[in-house]
Amino acid sequence: MRRVKMEKTTELKVRGIIGFMIKRVTPFGTGAKVDCPKEYTGKEVYLVITDNKGSKQ
């Protein structure tokens, strides 16, 4: 099974942001997924994992 390398940090600075959305990771087969609107197909995205256990979707 292929593993994606996780870069651990407490701060992230990104320029050229179009917008952002808060989503919940859901199970998918033997992995997980985050839904994203089709209009962002082909765009570069950053998935930021937080430890906010009670945050809204």
Image (cartoon, helix red, strand yellow):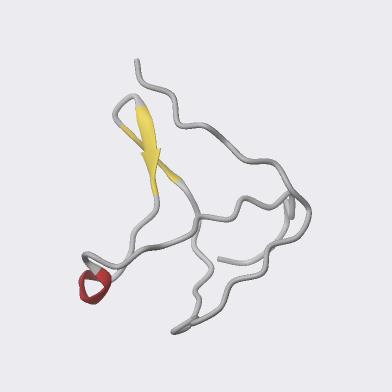
Quarter-of-image position of residue 31: top left
x and y, in percent, of residue 37 in the image:
28, 71
Name the quadrant containing residue 7.
top right
Locate the C terminus by quadrant. bottom right
In percent of width and height, residue 3 lies at 43, 24
Q: Residue at x 74, y 48 (%)?
A: 9
Say left or right for 33 vs 38: right
Tell whether 54 sits left or right of 26. Answer: right
Looking at the picture, does residue 33 appear above or below residue 46? above
Q: Answer above or below: position of 35 versus 2.
A: below
Q: Where is the N terminus found, in terms of image quarters?
A: top left
What residue occupies the far right of the structure in this picture?
Answer: 10
Q: Position of residue 54 (x, y in %)?
A: 73, 57
1, above or below 30, in the image: above
Residue found 62% across the figure and 50% down from its top: 49
Single out the residue that lies furthest toward the front.
Answer: 15
Relative side of 11 to 47, left or right: right
**Percent x, y for residue 55?**
69, 63
